[in-house]
């Protein structure tokens, strides 16, 4: 009986294997081409079009902000545009009122003509 108990207790252990790492794939090395040296002034790329656009825009803004005669001209132009817009709005209101009055007059005229047309039959 002791032999049976001993045989029942001894069972083969499962065999575990170490995981096998997957092969490592590397990116292919991209060939590098020589880059032409850029012309720079104090670390700025002066051949870049964005640089020149920014420089011109900055100069224009500086002129507008600092030059008094330019400021007066801008204010005068803006005030003329505002006045023209207000005049246009007023004229549009007048035209709307005229059209409304004409529509009301036509409605009244057609209302007075219809009864006369009915009695003429």
Image (cartoon, helix red, strand yellow):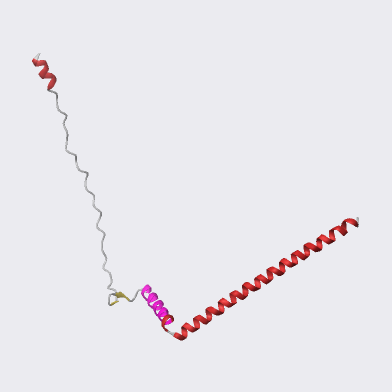
Q: Residue at x 86, y 58 (%)?
A: 115
Whether residue 78 is in magenta: the answer is: no
What segment is highlighted magenta in the picture? 49-63
Using the image as rendered, state which of residue 107 and residue 43 is in the foreground. 107
Q: Quadrant of residue 30?
A: bottom left
Q: Quadrant of residue 9?
A: top left
Using the image as rendered, state which of residue 116 and residue 44 is in the foreground. 116
Whether residue 52 is in magenta: the answer is: yes
Q: How many marks?
A: 0
Q: Residue at x 45, y 85 (%)?
A: 68
Residue 63 pos. (x, y %)? 42, 82
* Rendered view: 72 above or below 16: below
Residue 88 pos. (x, y %)? 62, 74
Task: Report the residue that reaches farthest toward the right.
Answer: 120
Q: Residue at x 43, y 84 (%)?
A: 67
Relative to 6, 49 lies left or right = right
Task: Report the residue that reaches farthest toward the left.
Answer: 2
* Rendered view: 90 above or below 115: below
């Amino acid at each position: 009986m002791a032999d049976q108990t001993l045989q029942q207790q001894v069972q083969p252990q499962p065999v575990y294997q170490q995981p096998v790492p997957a092969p490592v794939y590397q990116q292919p090395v991209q060939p590098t081409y020589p880059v032409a040296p850029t012309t720079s002034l104090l670390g700025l790329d002066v051949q870049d079009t964005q640089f020149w656009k920014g420089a011109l825009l900055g100069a224009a803004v500086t002129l507008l902000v600092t030059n008094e005669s330019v400021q007066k001209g801008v204010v005068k132009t803006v005030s003329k545009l505002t006045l023209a817009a207000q005049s246009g709005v007023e004229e549009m209101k007048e035209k709307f009122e005229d059209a409304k009055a004409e529509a009301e007059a036509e409605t009244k005229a057609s209302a007075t003509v219809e009864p006369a047309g009915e009695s003429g039959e």
